[in-house]
Amino acid sequence: MLEGDKPWRDERLPLIEDRVRARLQQLSARLSDVDWLDGAFSAGDLMMVSVLLRVRSSGILDEYPNLAAYVARGEARPAYKRAFAAQLAVNTGNHVAD
């Protein structure tokens, strides 16, 4: 994404996508049919959902239905919504000091 203007982008992209798919396959197998990484929803899930959101726009996440469902479950959690809103506020300069 950050190096899309480089002349070598088009020939490197398939390699990068294959590496991403390999890691997503591992995560998909790890999650299998469970809801969360470590039993109950945790900070690890907050972090993983944030990471997976970065690949959603590429369409690769759709190749792993259980991961797409995992992201949707994570985004729907009130704790995720609060954490995302707080991060967005900091990044946009709209945060209120405690």
Image: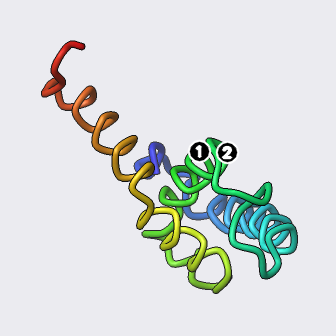
Q: Residue at x 57, y 59 (%)?
A: 52
User: Can you tell which quarter of the image residue 61 is in?
Assistant: bottom right
**Residue hosting label 2:** 44
Q: Position of residue 60 (x, y in %)?
A: 59, 76
Q: Residue at x 34, y 34 (%)?
A: 87
Left or right of residue 76, residue 89 in this image: left
Q: Secondary structure beneath disc 2?
A: helix
Left or right of residue 55, residue 33 in this image: right
Q: Is residue 61 above or below residue 37?
A: below
Q: Secondary structure beneath disc 1?
A: helix
Residue type marked 2: Gly
Q: Residue at x 45, y 43 (%)?
A: 2
Q: Are marks 1 and 2 in contact (CB under 8 Å)?
A: yes
Q: Residue furthest front?
A: 40
What crowding class fits label 1: few (fewer than 14 Cα within 10 Å), some (14-19), or many (20 or more)?
few
Between the residue at mark 1 and the residue at mark 2, the CA separation in whole angstroms equals 5 Å
Q: Position of residue 81 (x, y in %)?
A: 35, 52
What crowding class fits label 2: few (fewer than 14 Cα within 10 Å), some (14-19), or many (20 or more)?
few
**Residue hosting label 1:** 47
Q: Is residue 60 above or below residue 42?
A: below
